[in-house]
Image (cartoon, grey):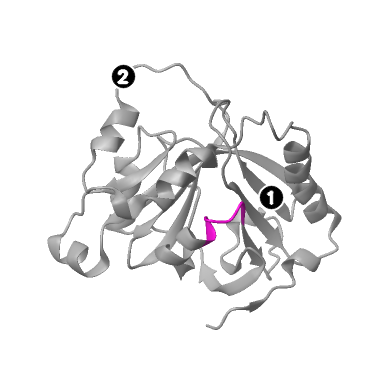
């Protein structure tokens, strides 16, 4: 589907504008010279260097083993972006990294395309549902229009059941709070045709604007350095 301009950022919804200001305030309130930056300074830079990383689960083992002093809020939401190098990207949202995702969807864009977007200072992924089901939470909608940095890239349907490959990724990252790398392939043929399975996992601050809008802002740990700001918006149009 050809990429075209999106009306997303022209919306006059007070809830959407409020959530966008959430990001702006958090960035403007910091001294740019002494800013602790975002998790993108570490995690997203690692994600952009994924072609240089070797296969295997050494990074997963390193991040998950041993006792560590918690750096992030216990109530933060976990977001995972993963996919084969030559395939499409998946987005999974979990209330806890030890639990199954409450929301998982295949985005209509290639992993390589998302990595190019992450070279910019700001990455905004927006999912807009044109349906409004009574008594349903916004994340319970099924059909979504997907935008990346203001451009509509297509439509996708929320998964109700995970495939074996998706379950493998979620299970392999069960003990990981944040990080980026590659996972060993479950199938040699799959790895040869689709490339290695890459992932990026981070913790997000969840903001509920209204019953029709929610947003996830990647948490900025102290001392992580400057990097890309990543935000994910869920909107239900009227």
Does the stretch in magenta take in 120?
A: yes
Say which quarter of the image contains residue 87.
bottom left
Side (left or right) of 157 relative to 147: left
Quadrant where the C terminus is found in the figure: bottom right
> On the image, numbered disc 2 is attached to which residue?
66
Q: Is residue 25 above or below residue 5?
A: above
Extreme residue in the left direction: 188
Rendering coords of residue 69 (x, y %): 45, 16
Extreme residue in the bottom direction: 2
In the image, which disc is placed on residue 145?
none
In the image, which disc is placed on residue 214?
1
In this view of the protein, which residue sits in the foreground, 35 or 195?
35
Task: Please say whether residue 160 is visible from this viewpoint.
Answer: no
Tell me the SS state at disc 2.
loop
The range drawn in magenta is 117-123
Does the stretch in magenta take in 156?
A: no
Side (left or right) of 226 relative to 115: right
Say which quarter of the image contains residue 197.
bottom left
Task: Please say whether residue 161 is visible from this viewpoint.
Answer: yes
Residue at horizontal 42%, vertical 49%? 47
Residue at horizontal 76%, vertical 64%? 9
Residue at horizontal 62%, vertical 73%? 152
Tell me the SS state at disc 1.
strand
Side (left or right) of 199 relative to 14: left
Crowding at dot 1, Cα within 10 Å, few <14 / some 14-19 / many 20+, comes out as: many
Rendering coords of residue 24 (x, y %): 76, 45
Number of dots carrying numbers = 2
Residue at horizontal 52%, vertical 55%? 118
Q: CA distance from mark 1 to mark 2?
A: 34 Å
Side (left or right) of 190 relative to 36: left
Rendering coords of residue 54 (x, y %): 23, 48
Crowding at dot 2, Cα within 10 Å, few <14 / some 14-19 / many 20+, comes out as: few
């Amino acid at each position: 589907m050809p990429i075209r301009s999106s009306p997303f950022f022209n919306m006059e919804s007070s809830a959407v504008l409020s959530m966008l200001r959430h990001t702006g305030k958090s960035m403007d309130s910091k001294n740019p010279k002494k800013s602790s930056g975002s998790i993108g300074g570490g995690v997203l830079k690692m994600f952009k260097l994924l072609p240089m990383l070797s296969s295997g689960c050494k990074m997963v083992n390193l991040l998950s083993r041993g006792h560590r002093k918690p750096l992030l809020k216990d109530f933060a939401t976990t977001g995972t972006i993963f996919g084969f190098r030559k395939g499409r990207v998946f987005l999974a949202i979990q209330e806890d990294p030890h639990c199954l995702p409450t929301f998982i969807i295949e985005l209509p864009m290639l992993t390589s395309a998302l990595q190019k977007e992450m070279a910019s200072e700001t990455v905004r992924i927006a999912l807009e549902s044109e349906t409004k089901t009574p008594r349903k939470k916004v994340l319970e909608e099924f059909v979504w229009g997907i935008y990346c940095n203001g451009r509509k890239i297509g439509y996708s349907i929320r998964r109700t059941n995970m495939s074996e490959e998706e379950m493998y990724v979620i299970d392999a990252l069960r003990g990981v709070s944040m990080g980026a790398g590659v996972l060993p392939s479950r199938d040699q043929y799959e790895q040869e045709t689709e490339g290695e399975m890459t992932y990026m996992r981070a913790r997000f601050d969840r903001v509920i604007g209204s019953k029709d809008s929610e947003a996830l802002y990647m948490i900025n740990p102290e001392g992580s350095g400057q990097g890309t700001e990543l935000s994910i918006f869920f909107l239900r149009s009227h």
